[in-house]
Image: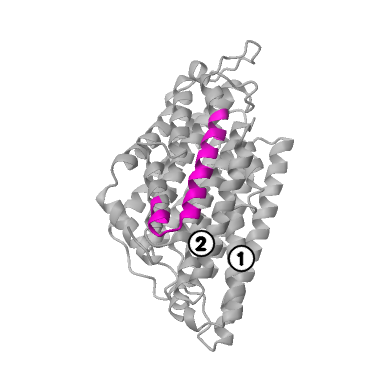
C-alpha cells in the first residue's frame, strides 16, 4: 500500500503521456488525484508498519504533510480541467505528466525515514516543477525557471553536503554508519559535535533555500509571478511543505542532541528576518502574483518562529503548515482567474475584479483576509497559538516583533489587494473572453470552506494527529 500510493501517480503520468487529445488528457489529473486522496485517507486510518529495513514509514509528521499535499493537489487537478480547456491551444502533455510525477515525488518525501531517500525525492520535486514554471513559454518564464532551478539546486546540493557531514559524524563517533532517522535521533547526543554542528548548518541553509526562508528566497518572486496559478499553488502549498518536512526531520535530530537550543535560536532569528523581508517588499507591490511570493516568505517565517519558540508553539506551527498550504491554494487559483480576465498582473490595469469576475474577486478578498490572520479563518487560530506561546514563555521581544511585522504586512498587502478587488475598472483595459465558470471557481470555493471550518473547529482526528506530530518535535498543545 505504501509503495502503491507512490506508484499510482506515475501510472497516471504514463496514461497522460499516451492520451493523444489535449482536452481529454486534462481529465487524467482529477481521476488520479481523487484515487490518491482516497488512498491517503486509508493510510491515515490504517497505517502499515515500517518496512523491514525501516526506510519507509508514515509517521504523524508525514501524515500531516501527505494530507495537506493530497487535498491541495486534488483541488488543483480539478481546477486544471477548466484552466487547460481555456488554454486548449497550448500543448499540455508535459504539464499533465510533470504534475503527476511531482505528486509521486512529494508522496515519497512524506513516507521516507531515510534521509538519503528523502533527499532524492525532494530533488525530484525540484526537477519536475521546472517545466511547470516554464509552461507559458516566454522570456520571463524561462528566466524564472532558470533562477528557480539554479537557487533550489544549489540549496539541495548544500543539503547533500550536510547529509554527508551527518553520516561522517557517526563514523568519527564510532557509531553505526546510517542515515535512518530513528537511529540518528537515538545516537544524536553521541555524534561528533564538530561534524554534527556543521551538518546542522548546511542542512538548515539547504532546506531553508527550498522553503524560501529569507535571505534564501530570491527564486520565489519570479517563479510564483510567472508560473500559472495552479502551479503557484502547488509551489507555495506543496513543495514548501515538503522542504519544511525535511527541515523538521533535521529538527528532530537537533533537539535530541545537545544543540537543540542553538538550532531553535537560529530558526527564530531567520523566521523574524523572513517576516521583516516580507513586510518591506510587500509594500506598494504592483504585481499581485509577486506579492503572493512575499506572502509565502512571510508564512515560512512564521513557521520558523514557531519552531524556534518550541513547546506549545509547535502545535501552532504544524496547524499553520496546513492552513498556509490551503489558503495559498485559494489565493493562487483566484489570482490566476483574475490574471486571465484582465490579461495583466499589474495593479495599474487590474481594478474592480468584483465587477468583472465576481466569484474570483470575492475569493481573492476572502483568502487575503484569511492569510493575514483575520478571524474566523484557520490562519488566525494557528498564528494566535504561536504568538500567545511567545508571551507565555516570556519572549516578549519575539512576540512584539511578530505582531509588528504582521501589522505591517497586513497594511502592505491590503494596499495591493483592495484596489484590485474594489477599484474602478479602467476604461482602456483590454477585453478578454475569460469569465468565471464552475470549473475554475468551485475548486477554490471548496478549499475556502475548509479554511473557514479550521477557523471555527478542528476535527478530533486532526487534533489528535497534530498533537502526536508536535510531540515528535518535543512539544504539544
* Image quadrant in which the C terminus is located: bottom left
What is the x, y in percent for residue 75? 43, 39
What is the x, y in percent for residue 209? 61, 56
What is the x, y in percent for residue 117? 52, 67
Residue 328's label in the rendered image is none
What is the x, y in percent for residue 243? 53, 57
Say which element carries label 1.
helix
Say which element carries label 2.
helix
User: Mainly helix, strand or loop, the magenta region?
Assistant: helix
Residue range highlighted in magenta: 388-415
Front-lying residue, 113 or 51: 113
Task: Check the image and name the residue furthest to the bottom.
Answer: 174
Compared with 71, 286 (above or below) is: above
Front-lying residue, 242 or 46: 242
Tell me, yes or no, whether the highlighted magenta stretch contains residue 389.
yes
Q: Residues within 10 Å of mark 2 (few under 14, many from 20)?
A: many
* Image quadrant in which the N terminus is located: bottom left
Compared with 338, 190 (above or below) is: below
> How many tags in the picture?
2
Q: Along the polypeptide, which appears first: circle 1 or circle 2?
A: 1
- Residue 75 makes an appearance in the image: yes
Task: Check the image and name the residue furthest to the top.
Answer: 427
Q: Which residue is mark 1?
A: 159
Q: Which residue is mark 2?
A: 246
Compared with 188, 15 (above or below) is: above
State yes or no: discs 1 and 2 in contact (Cβ < 8 Å).
yes
Compared with 35, 358 (above or below) is: above
Q: Is residue 141 left or right of residue 109?
A: right
Mark 1–mark 2 distance (CA, rounded to whole Å): 10 Å
- Residue 99 makes an appearance in the image: no
Tell me, yes or no, whether the highlighted magenta stretch contains residue 470.
no
Q: Is residue 408 left or right of residue 147?
A: left
Amino acid at each position: 500500500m505504501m509503495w502503491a500510493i507512490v506508484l499510482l501517480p506515475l501510472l497516471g503520468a504514463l496514461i497522460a503521456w499516451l492520451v493523444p487529445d489535449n482536452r481529454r488528457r486534462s481529465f487524467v489529473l482529477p481521476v488520479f488525484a481523487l484515487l490518491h486522496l482516497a488512498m491517503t485517507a486509508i493510510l491515515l486510518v490504517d497505517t502499515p508498519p515500517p518496512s523491514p529495513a525501516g526506510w519507509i514509514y508514515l509517521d504523524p509528521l508525514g501524515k500531516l504533510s501527505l494530507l495537506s499535499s493530497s487535498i491541495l493537489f486534488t483541488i488543483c487537478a480539478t481546477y486544471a480541467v477548466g484552466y487547460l480547456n481555456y488554454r486548449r491551444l497550448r500543448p499540455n502533455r508535459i504539464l499533465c505528466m510533470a504534475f503527476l510525477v511531482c505528486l509521486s515525488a512529494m508522496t515519497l518525501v512524506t513516507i521516507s525515514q531515510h534521509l538519503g531517500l528523502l533527499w532524492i525525492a525532494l530533488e525530484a520535486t525540484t526537477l519536475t516543477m521546472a517545466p511547470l514554471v516554464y509552461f507559458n513559454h516566454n522570456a520571463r518564464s524561462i528566466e524564472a525557471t532558470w533562477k528557480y532551478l539554479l537557487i533550489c539546486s544549489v540549496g539541495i546540493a548544500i543539503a547533500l553536503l550536510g547529509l554527508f557531514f551527518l553520516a561522517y559524524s557517526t563514523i568519527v563517533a564510532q557509531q553505526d554508519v546510517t542515515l535512518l532517522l530513528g537511529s540518528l535521533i537515538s545516537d544524536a547526543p553521541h555524534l561528533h559535535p564538530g561534524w554534527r554542528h556543521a551538518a546542522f548548518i548546511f542542512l538548515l541553509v539547504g532546506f531553508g533555500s527550498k522553503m524560501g526562508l529569507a535571505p534564501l528566497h530570491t527564486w520565489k518572486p519570479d517563479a510564483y509571478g510567472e508560473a500559472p496559478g495552479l502551479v503557484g499553488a502547488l509551489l507555495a502549498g506543496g513543495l514548501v511543505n515538503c522542504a519544511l518536512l525535511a527541515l523538521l526531520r533535521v529538527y528532530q535530530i537537533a533537539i535530541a542532541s545537545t544543540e537543540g537550543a542553538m538550532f531553535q535560536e537560529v530558526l527564530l532569528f531567520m523566521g523574524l528576518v523572513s517576516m521583516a523581508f516580507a513586510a518591506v517588499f510587500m509594500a506598494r507591490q504592483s504585481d499581485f502574483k509577486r506579492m503572493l511570493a512575499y506572502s509565502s516568505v512571510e508564512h515560512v517565517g512564521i513557521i520558523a518562529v514557531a519552531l524556534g519558540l518550541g513547546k506549545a508553539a509547535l502545535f501552532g506551527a504544524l496547524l499553520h503548515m496546513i492552513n498556509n498550504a490551503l489558503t495559498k491554494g485559494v489565493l493562487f487559483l483566484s489570482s490566476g482567474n483574475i490574471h486571465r480576465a484582465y490579461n495583466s498582473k499589474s495593479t495599474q490595469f487590474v481594478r474592480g475584479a468584483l465587477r468583472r469576475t465576481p466569484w474570483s474577486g470575492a475569493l481573492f478578498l476572502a483568502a487575503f483576509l484569511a492569510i493575514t490572520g483575520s478571524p474566523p479563518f484557520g490562519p488566525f487560530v494557528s498564528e494566535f497559538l504561536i504568538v500567545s506561546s511567545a508571551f507565555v514563555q516570556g519572549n516578549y521581544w519575539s512576540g512584539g516583533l511578530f505582531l509588528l511585522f504582521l501589522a505591517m504586512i497586513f497594511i502592505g498587502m491590503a494596499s495591493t489587494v483592495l484596489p484590485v478587488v474594489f477599484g474602478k475598472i479602467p476604461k482602456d483595459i483590454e477585453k478578454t473572453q475569460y469569465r468565471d465558470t464552475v470549473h475554475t471557481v468551485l475548486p477554490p470555493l471548496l478549499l475556502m470552506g475548509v479554511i473557514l471550518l479550521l477557523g471555527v473547529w478542528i476535527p478530533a482526528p486532526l487534533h489528535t494527529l497534530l498533537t502526536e506530530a508536535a510531540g515528535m518535535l518535543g512539544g504539544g498543545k
